[in-house]
Image (cartoon, rainbow, N blue to C red):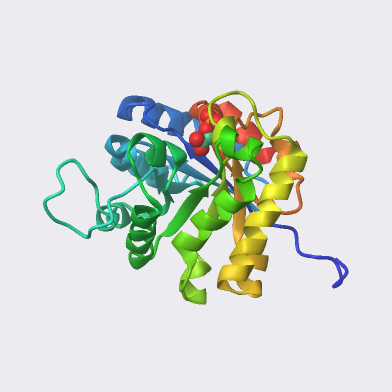
Amino acid sequence: MSPSLPAPREVLVSGNWKMNHDHYAAIHFVQKLAALLRTSPLPARRSLSLHPSFTSLRSVQAAVESDAVPVKLGAQDCHFAPEGAFTGEVSAGMLAKLNVAYVIVGHSERRGHFGETDEIVRAKLDAVLSQQMSPILCVGETLEEREAGTACQKVSTQLEAALSGRSAEVLGRVVIAYEPIWAIGTGRNADAGDAEEMAAHARAEVGRICGRETGAVVRVQYGGSITPDNASQILACENVDGLLVGGASLEADKLLEIVCAGA
Ligand code: PGA
């Protein structure tokens, strides 16, 4: 390869199962994925993380490790405190003990249904980073904000609240997921132009908040109604280097098609 050509990007596709798949279904999924990967391995510079519910994490970890399936383990959320009287919650340390590599933080469903503020999201980011895991920080605008022309402002505010004042070392582990809320679970994905524009904006904002070099290398995923049919178009965007996939990640063959799209 000519030294003047940029290196091919690393792409991370993350399957967010949300509140789907009990642990039996989760094991079955991993077995199916393992079989599919034996005949069609992941392309170079493509990687995959699976984000089951908390009750399935241990089963998925065991299935992935016993079959040496080339996927990373991910979680959908965690609490910000290291331990204590928080009935029903799961700490970042508990996830790290299960070899969780990625934790989704500030998903719009957490922000919307469970009242997570930017302050809480920042505290969760702290917790994930303190356990040496990578947070997938979700940002994105509502339909009303898009129509009012304030989408960029919304994303800037969310990024600033979560990332300001952090060191370059920890920023190297942060993944940004741009997810327009109007595209999540609606079947209406952003077109490639919109996805690229907002991913470029998010990257530029990370550069402004954290330093240009960090902005240039930060991984930016797009999420919202990704399917095998639209994945390659979105992955072709210059500033998109990964996907956060909900509904279409529930089937192993679809998820594999997505992670291989356009490679
Ligand atoms: P969706 O969800 O792919 O079902 O739209 C994406 C997400 O919520 O991360």
Identity of the residue drawn at 67% across and 67% down: 216
Q: Nearer the viewer, residue 8 or 36?
A: 8
In-image side of 37 versus 162 (left or right): right
The answer to whether residue 224 is seen in the rendering is no
Identity of the residue drawn at 52% across and 75% down: 168
Query: Where residue 33 appears, x then y in whole percent?
Result: 51, 33
Query: Where residue 150 appears, x then y in whole percent?
Result: 62, 46
In-image side of 34 versus 194 (left or right): left
Identity of the residue drawn at 26% across and 58% down: 93
Quadrant hosting residue 133: bottom left
Which quadrant: the C terminus?
top right
Which quadrant: the N terminus?
bottom right
Query: Where residue 149 appears, x then y in whole percent?
Result: 66, 43
Q: Residue furthest front?
A: 148
Q: Nearer the viewer, residue 180 or 237?
A: 180
In-image side of 67 versus 79 (left or right): right
The answer to whether residue 258 is seen in the rendering is yes
Q: Nearer the viewer, residue 113 or 78?
A: 113
Identity of the residue drawn at 14% across and 43% down: 87
Q: Nearer the viewer, residue 132 or 34?
A: 132
In-image side of 24 versus 85 (left or right): right
- Picture mark count: 0
Quadrant hosting residue 113: top left
Q: Residue furthest left?
A: 85
Query: Where residue 164 appears, x then y in whole percent?
Result: 48, 69
